[in-house]
Amino acid sequence: MKLQNKSQLYQNWIINLFVVLCNFNTIISQPCPNETDINLPDDWPCIWNNGTIPFVFNFYSVNPRKLRNLVRKGHDFLHKRSCLKFVERNPVTMARMPNTTYLFYSYSGALEVCCLHYYAKQIGRRNVLITPICTLPAEVAHATLHGMGIEHQSREPIPEVSVRAALFVTNCSELPKKVKNFGLR
């Protein structure tokens, strides 16, 4: 009888530990309240509030050299028009970091639209798919904004308030020039 009680107690302890860890993980992985701007996406990570967006490349995708070139041009397009700074990280290191949100760029040779929402979880890897149809710097920037959580209705432009909130989440030294470059009022 004592052996059964110890076994039952051990099983209850394991279950309780599992419940506590799951609740703790939920608390950690919750996005931060957007005190900076209510127009930021609901799943905007706190670590991006300083304007630094970490990203990695999928070097196992088709044509990694082309992927790197296209993404750099898209980032340059956004950098000239925003206060965001895109910082490349090591893909293995980022994959091992729990509760870190980053953009994960892949290239697909298939002809697909580039205006798709590819991530399901708020925290972690956010897939940004670059395709042969999505190769202009503005198109890569558009796909990047989707990876950052900015959405729009089908066949409608991204709302200006959402763009302004994300691109100018932090102030930068050239803010007036960058706002003018982007064409915002």
Image (spheres, rainbow, N blue to C red):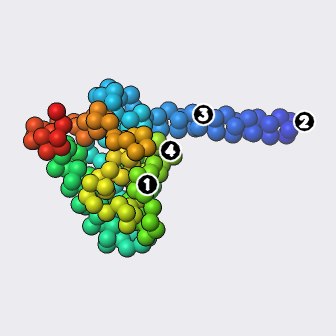
Disc 2 designates what residue? 1
Disc 1 designates what residue? 127
Q: Which of label 1 and label 3 is nearer to you?
A: 1
Mark positioned earlier in the residue sequence (3 or 2): 2
Q: How far apart are marks 2 and 4 (CA)?
A: 46 Å
Mark positioned earlier in the residue sequence (1 or 3): 3
Residue 149 visible in image: no
Q: Contact, CB < 8 Å: mark 2 with mark 4?
A: no
Mark positioned earlier in the residue sequence (2 or 1): 2
When asked about the image quadrant of residue 62, the answer is: bottom left
Disc 4 marks a residue whose amino acid type is: Lys
Q: How far apart are marks 1 and 4 (CA)?
A: 11 Å
Q: Distance between the residues labelled 1 and 3?
A: 30 Å
Disc 2 marks a residue whose amino acid type is: Met
Q: Position of residue 165 (x, y in %)?
A: 28, 34
Residue 60 visible in image: yes
Q: What kind of element bears circle 1?
A: strand
Q: Which mark is residue 39?
A: none
Residue drawn at 37 percent across, 67 percent down = 132
Disc 4 designates what residue? 121
Residue drawn at 32 percent across, 50 percent down = 142
Q: How many marks?
A: 4
Disc 3 designates what residue? 20
Q: Distance between the residues labelled 4 and 3?
A: 21 Å
